[in-house]
Image (cartoon, rainbow, N blue to C red):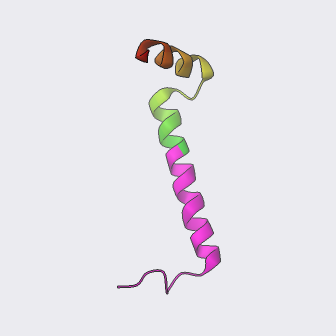
Amino acid sequence: MTISGKLSSKQWVALAGGFAVLALLVMMWRWGGTVEDSQAYFDTAR
């Protein structure tokens, strides 16, 4: 099963962009998306 043979380069870019946006949204939802929250998490992890 070759999926790569059926997707054009434009579709690959859209797929990668979709994953990037999804990852960013999950990160912002999970960690609050603010520098202060990230710094507080980093401080507690040290």
Q: Residue at x 44, y 32 (%)?
A: 30
Q: Is residue 35 above or below residue 27?
A: above
- 27 or 5, which is in the foreground? 5
Q: Position of residue 16 (x, y in %)?
A: 56, 62
User: Which span of residues is magenta-colored?
Assistant: 1-23
Q: Is residue 36 above or below residue 14?
A: above
Q: Quarter of the image for the C terminus: give it.
A: top left
Considering the whole magenta stretch, tell me its main secondary structure. Answer: helix
- In the displayed orientation, state which residue is furthest to the front: 46
Q: Residue at x 50, y 37 (%)?
A: 27
Left or right, residue 11 beside residue 27? right
Left or right, residue 14 beside residue 1? right
- In the displayed orientation, state which residue is furthest to the right: 10
Q: Quarter of the image for the N terminus: give it.
A: bottom left
Among the 4 quarters of the image, the one containing residue 3: bottom left
Q: Position of residue 29 (x, y in %)?
A: 48, 34
